[in-house]
């Protein structure tokens, strides 16, 4: 089986408002500072109300694990912020 030595993925997630995008970014920034793996590097920034996530990894399994983690954190942050708005 041939596993790539270096892989990269880029995601753009558009939110309803700039405030919502900022809240999610601020919520997940600590995770970027304490990345759990030395096999990946993550860049995240905001372009208006679009969150841009770039993940560089040494191999496909590391990329998949990072993508899963970041999307879980983004989803959770968005859901918690949505609860605050309705409650």
Image (cartoon, helix red, strand yellow):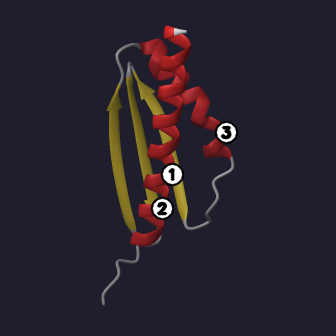
Q: At numbered mark 3, what does the secondary structure look like: helix, strand or loop? A: helix
Q: For the point 47% across and 33% down, which residue is it?
A: 45
Q: Name the residue under label 2.
A: 65
- Mark 3 to mark 1 CA distance (whole Å): 13 Å
What label does residue 69 carry, if any? 1
Q: Which is more N-terminal, label 1 or label 3?
A: 3
Instruction: Examine the rendered structure and indicate whether residue 12 appears above or below residue 8.
Output: above
Instruction: Examine the rendered structure and indicate whether residue 42 appears above or below residue 36.
Output: above
Circles 1 and 2, Cβ within 8 Å, touching? The answer is yes
Q: For the point 53% across and 41% down, which residue is it?
A: 73
Q: At numbered mark 1, what does the secondary structure look like: helix, strand or loop? A: helix
Instruction: Examine the rendered structure and indicate whether residue 61 appears above or below residue 52.
Output: below
Placement of the N terminus among the 4 image quadrants: bottom left
- Along the line of sight, the residue nearer the viewer: 72 or 54: 72
- Mark 2 to mark 3 CA distance (whole Å): 18 Å
Mark 2 or mark 3, whichever is nearer to me: 2
Circles 2 and 3, Cβ within 8 Å, touching? The answer is no
- Residues packed near mark 2 inside 10 Å, few (<14), some (14 to 19) or many (20 plus): few
- Along the line of sight, the residue nearer the viewer: 75 or 3: 75
Q: Name the residue under label 3.
A: 30
Q: In which quarter of the image is residue 53?
A: top left
């Amino acid at each position: 089986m041939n596993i790539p030595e270096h892989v990269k993925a880029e995601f753009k997630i558009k939110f309803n408002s700039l405030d919502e995008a900022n809240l999610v970014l601020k919520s997940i920034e600590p995770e970027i500072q304490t990345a759990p793996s030395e096999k990946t590097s993550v860049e995240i920034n905001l372009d208006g109300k679009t969150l841009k996530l770039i993940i560089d990894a040494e191999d496909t399994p590391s990329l998949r694990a990072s993508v899963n983690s970041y999307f879980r954190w983004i989803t959770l942050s968005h859901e918690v912020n949505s609860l605050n708005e309705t409650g």
